[in-house]
Image: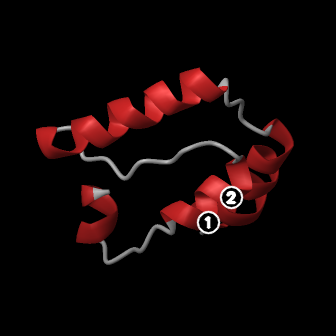
């Protein structure tokens, strides 16, 4: 998140959650302020036995991520 913000990029966490069907937590690894939300999301996923929708992930990656890396 910190790198994206530094590059003036916006990440729609809620939209990513909807597409992947799993909790998504904005996270800065060096900032312990984010850890509680991360661990809470992990616990919720384990309790609900959430599984990623692989097809949605592949579609998301192909439509949104690959174009970011093309010249």
- Viewer can see residue 63: yes
Residue that appears at 80% across and 49% down: 56
Which quadrant is home to the N terminus?
bottom left
Contact, CB < 8 Å: mark 1 with mark 2?
A: yes
Drawn side of residue 13 relative to residue 5, left or right: right
Q: Residues within 10 Å of mark 2 (few under 14, many from 20)?
A: few
Q: Which mark is residue 71?
A: none
Tally of numbered discs: 2
Which quadrant is home to the C terminus?
bottom right
Q: Position of residue 27 (x, y in %)?
A: 31, 47
Q: Which mark is residue 15?
A: 1
Q: Secondary structure at mark 2?
A: helix
Q: Residue furthest right?
A: 55
The one of 14 and 64 positioned closer to us in this rendering: 14
Q: Residue furthest front?
A: 47
Residue that appears at 28% across and 69% down: 5
Residue that appears at 34% across and 64% down: 4
Question: Which residue matches tag 2?
Answer: 18
As drawn, 16 above or below 54: below
The one of 44 and 35 positioned closer to us in this rendering: 44
Q: Position of residue 11 (x, y in %)?
A: 46, 67
Quarter-of-image position of residue 64? bottom right
Drawn side of residue 8 relative to residue 66, left or right: left
Residue that appears at 56% across and 30% down: 45
Q: Position of residue 13 (x, y in %)?
A: 50, 61
């Amino acid at each position: 998140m910190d790198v994206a913000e530094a590059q003036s990029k916006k990440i729609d966490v809620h939209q990513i959650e909807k597409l992947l069907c799993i909790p998504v937590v904005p996270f800065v690894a060096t900032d312990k302020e984010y850890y509680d939300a991360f661990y809470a999301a992990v616990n919720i996923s384990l309790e609900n036995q959430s599984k990623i929708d692989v097809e949605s992930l592949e579609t998301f990656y192909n439509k949104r991520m690959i174009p970011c890396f093309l010249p």
